[in-house]
Amino acid sequence: MEQLLQNIIFPQSSALEGNYELFYLGGRGIYDMEQKKLHLADSTVTDFCSYMNSFSLIKWKEYTAVGSVRLSLHLSGRGQVELVGYHLNIHSPVRQTFGIYDFNSADKCEMDIHFPENEEMVIGFEVRAFSDVTVYGGAWYGSYEESQKKEVVLSVATTTMKKEDFITRNMASLKEEILDADDDMKEHFYIHVVDNGRTLDAESMDSWHLTVHPNKNTGGSGGYARGMIESLEQNPPATHVLLMDDDVTIQPESVRRTYHLLSYLRDEYRDSFISGAMLLYEEMQFQHEDVGAIRDACTLTSLKGLFDMTEKRSLLKNEEEGCGYGHRYAGWWYCCIPAHMIREKGLPLPLFIRFDDVEFGLRCKPKFITMNGICIWHMGFAGKYNLAMDRYQMCRNPLVVDAVGSMPGTVNAPDYVRKAFRSELLKFNYNAAELILRAFKDFLRGPEFFQIDQGEKIIKENVQKNEKYQPMNNWPDIEVNFVEIFEDFDRKPLETLWYRVTFNGQRLWPFGTLKKGMIPVFFSDVYQPGRYVGHDAMLAVNVDNRTAVERHMDKNRYRSLKREWDQAYRYYKRNRSSIVKSYQDAQPYLVSTEFWKKYLGI
């Protein structure tokens, strides 16, 4: 039997049209969005072996038992279709040609080309135009044994909080392209929109296989927990739940490819998560991450780094590097989870926001499946540093993850939080230190603290601690080099000793005088002791939006925060075993459907 696996697609918005090289490379054609066809000029060569339209042969063979592959194209005009494949020779792309096929038709015609057996990483095609040529679309098909097909019921669970424009646009797109289309997939596809803000018109949005669920604002973890519950309890129950962010740009084709991949997935990948890549909304050709990992220092990182997906080398490297096992997770901007894994491992921890997807991945320890073209576009994180989130949520939640036993043994979350508190004091960011202290003390309250619906209240209180940044022209006398500000300065041995003994002058001032002037420093959680040493004032600079805020030494506030921290940390050291046991004992209940239904009031 033969199965459609991927459609040939074109940019469906003006933003994507400006990044057409994700879809095809070469001379820019003219795309008719209404008629959904691409016009190519005479004497041009257009390469469709692109991020969106290449066929990842290496991945389809790895994840499924695909046999022969067929390319179907709908074209008009006169020209040639050249079949190509690529692999890497160490780091350099190597191109192979597998055949050239002529076409010549004034009217729309169909070309069916069986791709020769080969071992290339990705395969694709190029169109050589000998006249004006129109490409109406096409698809990649693969052959399978009938017995290999699996019954899949795919449910999208997305949670939103007052992001009406994004969510209504995305749902309309999924509805038009899948639920209202002539597509067999639609019978096995459901959408659950969890509305934490209760601002959507559920009555007008609800339709066949699409349901809006007004929900308490219980953060991302509560929204996704509700979406998982609804997916597992729908009729028929979902076999897979696709968690998707609200403030993203999606292409229904990514969801369709996910469905087809699941339909023929090898048994050894039964427990795997399909992790869709996050591409940057601001620079749409760049992939930020498809699978992340937690470092021993308790920081999160992308496994692959930034890839320009309009480059062949990046296209191939992205498919070459396996995701394997280890301390890894998939971001919930696009993460497809088998329903049986949710039943076996439980729902998210009630962390409100941040680190819930990390904890879930660490808890489940799945294999991760990625593939070029399965992705979303999301606003990047540069310049979005927020004390209420990054210094409370991102300190409190790793402590909980560590206590319940999901954190890798090489990661020391309490030490990470201790160092974070210390670094904020040393750069006179007392509000940040206060938030870290609150995060630590709230963690010490035990698992009962997390059974109370107070996440929204905590966030609103913590937001009051955010620094108030002002335009840089408010400090005309301070020279700031926006490139070098990322760099630290070297410290002399005596400066290092003084810095440590005096806590950068806050504990005592045994000798010397303060350095004159306000020193520019990088604004976020980056630690630059060489810049701080000997100064009693700093100008924290956000280079992305050219704003800044002053930070001044306050010895009284330092003493108060340090004293309170020392008391809390001593308590933790004395009672660590009982604290950890209380979290581990509570963990099964905290991730249960029973708990979440009570917490959500459903």
Image (tube, rainbow, N blue to C red):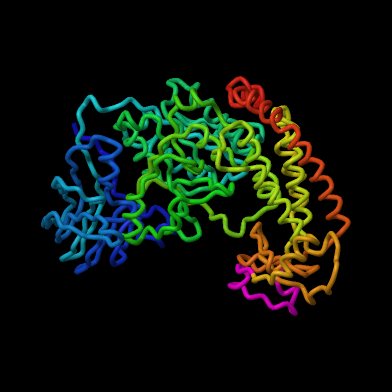
The structure residue drawn at horizontal position 20% and vertical position 64%, both measured from the top left corner, is 132
Percent coordinates x, y for residue 114 in the rendering:
14, 45
The C terminus sits in image quarter: top right
Q: Does the magenta stretch include residue 4?
A: no
Residue toward you, 58 or 512: 512
Q: Does the magenta stretch include residue 476?
A: yes
> Magenta span covers which residues?
471-488
The N terminus sits in image quarter: top left
Total tally of numbered discs in the picture: 0
Percent coordinates x, y for residue 67 in the rendering:
19, 37
Percent coordinates x, y for residue 476 in the rendering:
74, 78
Q: In this view, does 410 lie above or below 19?
A: above
Q: Is residue 393 above or below residue 577?
A: below
Q: State left or right for residue 83 relative to residue 443.
A: left
Q: In this view, does 456 lie above or below 187?
A: below
Q: State left or right for residue 352 relative to residue 106.
A: right
Q: State left or right for residue 514 relative to residue 230.
A: right
Decide whether the magenta segment is chiefly helix, strand or loop.
Answer: loop
Residue toward you, 516 or 591: 516
Q: Residue 499: tell me if it is visible.
A: yes
Quarter holding residue 483: bottom right
Percent coordinates x, y for residue 516 in the rendering:
79, 77
Residue toward you, 227 or 306: 306
The structure residue drawn at horizontal position 19% and vertical position 48%, both measured from the top left corner, is 119
Quarter holding residue 429: bottom right
Q: Residue 198: tell me if it is visible.
A: no
Quarter holding residue 93: bottom left
Q: In the image as oriented, which residue stretches furthest toward the right? A: 556
